[in-house]
Image (tube, rainbow, N blue to C red):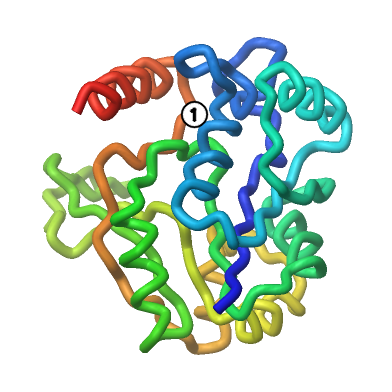
Amino acid sequence: MLGTVIITAGGIGKRMGGTIPKQFLPLQGKPILLHTLENFHRYDSSLQLIITLPSDWISYWEELLLNHQCAIPHQVVIGGEERFHSIQLALEHCRGAFVAVHDGVRPLVSHETIKRCFTALEHSKSVIPVLSLKDSLRFVDASGSKIADRTAFKLVHTPQCFDATILKEAYQTSYQSGMTDDASVLERLGIQPYLVESNEENIKITTNSDLCIADAFLQQMNAS
């Protein structure tokens, strides 16, 4: 069954600082986004791969591909104002029976996590990978703070995976501020996501500290 992966890289990385969007920053000599692209291609070379990018940085991406001699087949779609709009635009090009949406700056998602997500689609229309929390939590409001039950919360990762028809239907709506990820868009249709386990290395690189952690993870993975 043909599947599509939308790799979202439409942001400019304000939290990282600097002049280059975070998805292009080098991780062990290779752009973060290229690591992500290669990872999904290694998992299954038949996947349709789509990348959303800011229009001003598409030529830069093309130069990076030439410099790193990357010929992995993929389509580039110009990103929209919000992540929501980028997905809307990318969905117009999806040919797969299912669609996975993945953050371009999560280069270390394991093939085991991807497989768990794809396999779960056999019995669910919406699947997301999550991790349990390790740290204690406190709920804060105007009256102060109190301890919260961490077992009632999960960290949400990507790829978030969906039946293509349902996802396209969900994205026919207009953007609202509460739509923080794709599963939240489907929830407005009454579709609850099925949760599967993610891998700890599947971090989202948004700060310089994250980049250092990812580098350490990658070194460990390459050594094993």
Q: Is disc 1 placed on a helix, strand or loop?
A: loop
Q: Is residue 27 visible?
A: yes
Q: Establish if 25 lies above or below 50.
A: above
Depth check: give the residue in front, 102 or 223: 223
Residue appearing at x 47%, y 86% in the figure: 191
Total marks placed? 1
Q: Position of residue 64 (x, y in %)?
A: 73, 21
What x and y, as percent, mark residue 172? 76, 79
- Residue 49's quadrant in the figure? bottom right
Instruction: Find residue 60 and report its image quarter.
Output: top right
Q: Identify whether 175 is placed above or below 134.
A: below
Towards the viewer: 98 or 55: 98
**Residue 119 place in picture, x, y as percent:** 35, 75
Q: Residue at x 54, y 48 (%)?
A: 41
User: In this figure, which residue is indicated by the disc labeled 1?
Assistant: 206
Structural crowding at the residue carrying mark 1, measured as other residues with C-alpha within 10 Å and reported as few (<14), some (14–19) or many (≥20): some
Determine the residue positioned at 64% across, 47% down. 8
Residue at (51% x, 49% y) in the render? 40
Q: Is 77 left, or right, of 151 in this rendering?
A: right
Closer-to-camera residue (90/179): 90
Q: Amino acid at mark 1?
A: Thr
Residue 180, visible in the rendered structure: no
Return the x and y of residue 139 as percentages of the image width and height: 24, 50
